Image: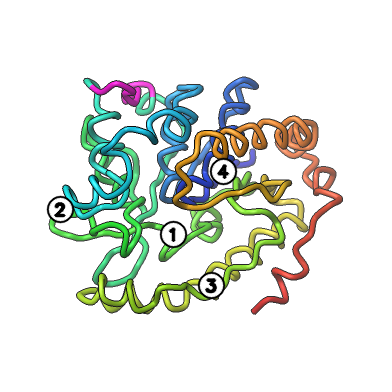
Amino acid sequence: MSKIGLIVEGGGMKCAYGAGILDAFLDDKIKFDYCIGVSAGSANAASFLAGQKGRNRRFYTDHIFEPDYFGLKSYLKTHNLFGLQYIYGTLSNSDGTDALDYRSLMLNNTEYLIVATDANSGEPRYFHKEEMPKDDYRIIMASSALPGACVPVEIDGHYYYDGGVSDSIPVKKAIEDGCDKLVIIMSKPRDFVKKPESLRGFYSFKCRNYPKIIELLNNRHIAYTDSQRMAYQLEQDGKAFIFAPSEHLSMGTFTMSRESNEKLYKLGLKDYACLRDGLKQFLDGDGQACISKENNYKNIIEAV
């Protein structure tokens, strides 16, 4: 019997797209044996595994206007541009206004991992959901702590940054953990080619105490392209099914626009509807039949 895994990429507010896909999964009662999330993708995955349809959507369209969610007030108060404690603490705790259903998450049989990056070693750390106590979602905060925009998150004496710094699309990890098939939700279109990070001077200063993080950021475009290559090759081999935005909408990591994020969410629903039959074929066993005829990844493979 196949072990089917789900990978949910990060990307800040671009993950509104994945929120649409995941809500469609809930409508169709699609389940996975394994799930690994990165950055905002790890938060999306938590709501999905808890069975909370619509919860992710609210974090991209409603909560963004709350003063502690993002911006100067959050930065002056916590040194985080994104209010990680507010988003994954105040709002998400059991007494919060949009609480994560922790009990349902833990009762879900899906193996759930969250990726963070050790600030000192630069190595990825793969946390399991069992390491996340109720009302202590620092693991998700750590996975979402963008270097430069956020300070690293301390867990058991270690400091962690965003999981995307070390493993943006954790295909290799999922395979190592025994997955035979993978469903991958990407936050960028198929023809996206990552360029070298901008603001190198800024993040080098902000992360000056963590040289491994600076090194990873300097070379992130190379590592990211390698992950894309692996994902698209698995798709060609019939071992992966990929959701990626089919349209080039206005999207950005820091886009605090209800209209833009709602369009991304609805694009996720639209893309799911278009690929629904192919996904069913893939999950039922006929992997080759579902490969998108519009697969446009030649430029990705040849980029680096």
Task: Magenta stretch: give its range.
Answer: 96-104
Separation of marks 2 and 4 at Cα, in angstroms: 28 Å
Nearest to viewer (mark 3 / mark 4): 3
Asked if disc 2 and disc 1 are in contact, CB closer than 8 Å, the reply is: no
Classify mark 4: residues with Cα within 10 Å, few (<14), some (14-19) or many (20+).
Answer: many
User: For the residue labelled by badge 4, is the local secondary structure a helix, a strand or a loop?
Assistant: strand
Query: Which label is found at residue 5?
Result: 4
Q: Amino acid at mark 1?
A: Gly
The x and y percentages for residue 32 are: 56, 34
| Vertical side of 16 occupied by 63: above or below | above
Separation of marks 4 and 1 at Cα, in angstroms: 18 Å
Asked if disc 3 and disc 4 are in contact, CB closer than 8 Å, the reply is: no
Q: Which residue is mark 2?
A: 156
Of mark 2 and mark 3, the one earlier in the sequence is 2
Classify mark 2: residues with Cα within 10 Å, few (<14), some (14-19) or many (20+).
Answer: few
- Quadrant of the frame with the C terminus: bottom right
Residue occupying image coordinates x 47% and y 22%: 51
200 with respect to 222 (left or right): left
The x and y percentages for residue 92 are: 29, 29
